[in-house]
Every structure is written in C-alpha cells, then in structure tokens.
Amino acid sequence: MNSDAHYCCSAGRMREGRHDFMARAGDEILVIKDVPALICDTCGEVEYTLDVSREIDAIMKEFFAGRLLAKPLAAGEIVFKPRW
Ligand SMILES: [Zn+2]
C-alpha cells in the first residue's frame, strides 16, 4: 500500500510544490509567497497541510490587524463582465 500517493480528480496526483496564497479583506490584499502546498498536476487544485493552513491564518490575522509590514505590490481590480 502506497500511503503517500494522494489523488485529486480522476487522474490528478497531488505533488509537493509552492504556491502564492492570496487573501482579500476590503481593499487590502495580502499575498503570501512560496507557501508549501500540494498541487494537483491535472486540475491545479491546491491543498495545504493543517500546519500550513494554521500558519496562513496566523499571518492573515496579523497582517489585517496591521501588525505585519508587507512589501507593497501593484494590484489591479477588474469586475468580471462577459463580452458575449
Ligand atoms: Zn485534480
């Protein structure tokens, strides 16, 4: 039995990689870079371990409480408006 094989969608396999996590609160956007994650090689679904998602929660709380100094990024916002 191969216990570390972890399958996602029908053919997808979760592989270890890095992912940029993004969260938004009002007009503030936080990007956490290089978060270790399991990423499906077929559909791109991202999964975090429990420890990693706890850490993400902690970072988000501190950031949105204004206690973390983040590097400013240029961001653009566009409302989805189909042209069909
Ligand atoms: Zn998948």
Image: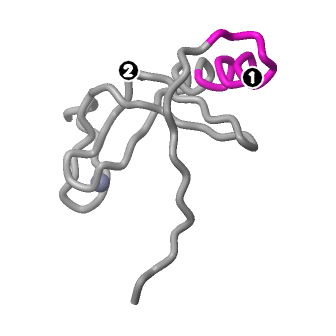
Identify the residue at horizontal 60%, vertical 18% (top origin): 55
Whole-percent x and y of residue 42? 20, 53
Quadrant of the frame with the N terminus:
top left
The residue closer to the viewer here, 5 or 9, is: 9
Q: Is residue 76 magenta?
A: no
- Residue 50 located left or right of residue 20: right
Whole-percent x and y of residue 81? 51, 76
Residue 58: quarter of image: top right
Check disc 1 and report its element: helix, strand or loop.
helix
Question: Quick one: label 1, few (<14), some, or many (20+) residues within 10 Å?
Answer: few
The disc label shown at residue 8, or none: none
Quadrant of the frame with the C terminus:
bottom left
The residue that disc 2 covers is: 34
Pointer 2 residue Cβ closer than 8 Å to ligand 1: no
Identify the residue at horizontal 62%, vertical 22% (top origin): 54
Ligand number 1: quarter of image: bottom left
Q: Earlier in the sequence, mark 2 or mark 1?
A: 2
Whole-percent x and y of residue 63? 70, 19
Residue extending farthest right: 65
Residue 34: quarter of image: top left
State the predominant SS element of the stretch in magenta.
Answer: helix
- Residue 41 located left or right of residue 49: left
Q: Amino acid at mark 2?
A: Asp
The residue closer to the viewer here, 57 or 79, is: 79
Range drawn in magenta: 56-69
Q: Is residue 66 magenta?
A: yes
Identify the residue at horizontal 53%, vertical 59% (top origin): 78
The residue closer to the viewer here, 56 or 64, is: 64
- Residue 63 located left or right of residue 37: right
The residue that disc 1 covers is: 61
Q: Amino acid at mark 1?
A: Lys
Residue 60: quarter of image: top right
